[in-house]
Amino acid sequence: MKVLKFGGTSVGKPERMHQVADIITSGEDRQIVVLSAVSGTTNALVEIGEMLASGNKSGAKELSATLKLHYQDFVQQLYHQEDSQSKGNEIVNEHFNFVQALIEGVYSEHAEKVLLAQGELLSTKLFYEYLREIKVRAAFLEALDFMSIDENQEPEIEKISKKLSDKISEYADCELFITQGFICKNHRQEVDNLKRGGSDYTASLIGAAIKAEEVQIWTDIDGMHNNDPRIVEKTFPIALLSFDEAAELSYFGAKILHPASIWPAQKFNVPVRLKNTMQPEAKGTYINKEHTDSDIKAIAAKDGITAIKIKSSRMLLAYGFLRKVFEIFEKYRTPIDLITTSEVAISLTIDEDTHLDQITSELKSFGTVEIDREQTIVCIVGSRVVEQRGIVRKIFDSLEDIPVRMISYGGSKNNISILIDTDYKKQTLDKLNTGLFSLNLC
Ligand SMILES: Nc1ncnc2c1ncn2[C@@H]1O[C@H](COP(=O)(O)OP(=O)(O)O)[C@@H](O)[C@H]1O
Ligand SMILES: N[C@@H](CC(=O)OP(=O)(O)O)C(=O)O
């Protein structure tokens, strides 16, 4: 069994949904197809939610009406037969009546989650109806019946595995299953989600739960590129990555993959393939456990980073100091990304600054605390990249006059990270692209 996930851009237009149908019907394997919401939908639903949270019901109604018009148009172009079009319109009406009821009701955190779930419910139902129109046999699986997270928002793989296997066995003679990405139930049995971009995570969790032969992530680009193609002009796809390399790249900003989407596949040794829906013949990227060549594979960048420097003469020759500092971050459930220390100072970074004020005020009991916001982590990834001779010189030669705030070397064998001010991000990515990949770029 293979798991194929199609992202928002891959189902973002009626003709793209037709392409998705072509792709899934050309394979010979049994498949679970995971769909995201039509591109732009989740953003619009988030906006409607924000309007409701600030009491702007009329704005929310207006945006919901615009979105509904978009879907009515979508339905017109998706189907060729009248009965499918009227079924499609029924689906659209059902979900937008529901959104309307949420707008009229009392807004809450729970209502927000239910609102955000409408995107994936709409896309999968509309697509399933299209399959029915073109006479492709498939079974519709409700993700809310099997995908669950616990009180710590962690997926319950064993439960997911049991429930999903039971569901699939009800359709012994069916080769194709359609389900929603992103959405799940939480420990209170309420509708919840796996955070933005979470459909990749759904696919990987399903892959792990059913021990799939392969998970395929279909998107709008021909695989993981060596650098961020939204920022750098000349980038190229990477044919092979190890799980570790892919995990580092996704965690540090390669948007093509949700940061959590690698670990379930890695844990259950399910290879992941990244493919382009618009160019299915392109090779894409294959991610598996094999250690690939020791070489620099790619660069990724993560914005929204805050750097914290704690300077304290009490650190000098003291032990237990770092523990006390870490306890403060633990208390406020704030993960630390990079860290460097000297005898009298610690610099570290966080990307979750909800509790920054409390953390800062507690850290002040140790010494002076300096905060720098709007920082970016740039991460250079490759199997055993740190073991390459001359790598650090190459990096710093490429960066010339870019002020580097921190460097993390040796924490992981596969990753060298630097911290820069976000204003220097484009320059840094461009310079590293020419400095580290000049041979591949000609
Ligand atoms: N290193 C990278 N390699 C490939 N794509 C990347 C990389 N970094 C960022 N991206 C962006 O990720 C996008 C695909 O991810 P996403 O928009 O989430 O797709 P989908 O809608 O299919 O879920 C690409 O269009 C590309 O702009
Ligand atoms: N629709 C959700 C989940 C998702 O994964 O979307 P995409 O595959 O388009 O990144 C979101 O926008 O966050």
Image (tube, grey):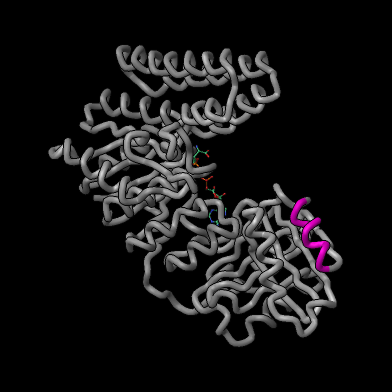
Residue 243 in the image, given as x and y percentages of width and height = 43, 65
One can see residue 434 in this view = no
In x, y percent, where is residue 119?
47, 29
* Magenta segment main secondary structure: helix
> From where the camera sits, is residue 334 visible?
yes
Where is residue 202, by image quadrant? top left
Q: Which residue is pictured at 52% across the width and 34% down the height?
A: 39
Q: Does the magenta stretch include residue 400?
A: no
Q: In this view, does 368 lie to the left or right of 439?
A: right
In the rendered view, tell whether residue 85 sits above or below residue 171: above
Q: Which residue lies furthest to the bottom in this view?
A: 389
Q: Is residue 404 left or right of residue 291?
A: right
Q: Which of these two is toward me, 323 or 71?
A: 323
> Residue 164: where, in percent of width, then height?
27, 42
Q: Examine the rendered structure and indicate whether residue 296 appears above or below residue 273.
A: below
Report x, y in % for residue 232.
65, 57
Is the residue 383 above or below the residue 32 in the image? below
Q: Nearer the viewer, residue 370 or 423?
A: 370
Q: Residue at x 67, y 59 (%)?
A: 329
Q: Residue at x 70, y 62 (%)?
A: 349
User: Quarter holding the C terminus?
Assistant: bottom right
The question of residue 363 being in magenta is answered with yes
Residue at image location 49% in from the left, 27% down from the top: 114
- Magenta range is 358-366
